[in-house]
Image (cartoon, helix red, strand yellow):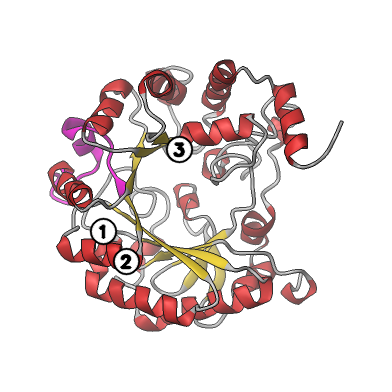
Amino acid sequence: MSSASIAVPRLGLVILKVAGRCNLDCTYCYEFNLADHTLAAGPKTMSDEVFEAVIERIRRHADKSGQRSVSLSFHGGEPCLIGSARFDRWCTHVRRALPDLRVYLSLQTNGTLLNSEWIDVFRNHGVDVGVSLDGPPDVHDTFRVRRNGSGSYRAVRRGIDLLQQNDLPYGILAVVQLGADPLRIHRHFMDIGCRSVSYLMPDLTHDTIGNVREKHGPTPCADYLIPIFEEWWHNSTIEVRIRNFWEVSRLILGGTSHVDALGNIPLGFVVVNPSGEVEGLDVLKACEEGITSTGINVLGNDFTDLFRTSPLHSRMVFEGAPLPSDCIGCVEMDTCAGGYHPHRYSRERGFDNRSVWCADLLKIFAHLRSRLDVAPSETVRLRRELEGVTG
């Protein structure tokens, strides 16, 4: 399909992989230690030429789509490897090059390289910061290690302490540690002052989940998250935001998903590598080598060229992926809606599988429904009301 023959949809987010290397060697990292190694094979950092080309492609896309805002999220590898001075210069360029757009800036970091210079840049440009932390030292340092095998917890805590001391808000991304004590981990986050946490289910596929259930039980993610939910439900103030539970609750109450892991929504974002190559959902690198490739590069292509070069990714980004056939008729087919794309994958059937965490998701939805006292039929009614439909 030609991009000229369709309305140009909004592109709400562009993820910039500004560093193609990392100073850590986390064992579960989908960029470097799972199925795909594209990032490691490319440039170490994004050049000014590529960065400026990304911003120009965003401007062109916004002109066509009519959107008034865009979010830019700086990722890696480890994005702080580009240095605070270059990041400062790029943020200034963004504001000047996109004067007609409301631009929201964020950066996802492992936290180990944060210092006073980075703090000043974050404050000056209003950058939202996400930090990866998996729990107390013995938990975090099991997987989030340096290349010599030593742990990174102390360096991450120094970065978090700097953010707190300077009153800069931040969020924590924590990978679910199967078999660990969830309340000990969650209470650690609360004890050190974290007020926004997202718990991520491990990026396993139908080809790689292996004996996880045999080792950890049939619903290890739900068994990890539900005790945290109960702790949060009964003991936390409104200032503590656990993103997983907010999003599941939003869907149960008839709303639409704000995250790509639930709801089967159009992703609404693309990823740009240091070389300028445009990718779809980067976490698909957990599936197989080369699966995120779209065949376009910001140095020569607009984002709408996805329609011409990559039906898989254009569908995921702009339209939404098909619901897995196994999910049709499920009580949560319009809420969970198949779960996260990489967790659906198998080499045999592609993405036409229910999530490897299907049983966990159903258990989580059922538990939150019981707390909210909202049955699936009530969700349907609430969604119709919110959409302005009666009956």
8 horizontally vs 156: left or right: right
Q: Which amino acid type is shown beneath numbered disc 1?
A: Cys
Q: How many numbered dots are placed on residues in this image? A: 3
Q: Mark 1 or mark 3: which comes first in sequence?
A: 1
Q: Residue at x 70, y 34 (%)?
A: 334
Residue 264 position within the rendered picture, expressed as x and y whole percent measured from the top left: 64, 43
320 within the magenta span: no
The quadrant in which the C terminus is found is top right
Q: Which residues are magenta?
A: 131-152
Foreground disc of the pair 2, 3: 3
Q: Which mark is residue 252?
A: none
Task: Determine the CA span between mark 2 and mark 3.
Answer: 27 Å
- Residue at 26%, 70% in the rendered image: 82
Residue beneath disc 3: 243
Q: Tag 1, which secondary structure? A: loop
Name the residue at 61% across, 45% down. Answer: 350
Q: Which residue is mark 1?
A: 22
Task: Name the N-terminal-most of marks 2 and 3.
Answer: 2
Q: Nearer the viewer, residue 157 or 276?
A: 157
Circles 1 and 3: CB atoms closer than 8 Å: no
**Amino acid of disc 2:** Ala
> Residue 12 placed where, x, y %?
56, 61
Residue at image x 72%, y 31%? 382
Q: Badges 2 and 3: C-beta atoms under 8 Å apart?
A: no
Instruction: Bin the neighbour count of mark 2 within 10 Å (Cα to Cα): few under 14, some 14-19, many 20 and up.
Output: many
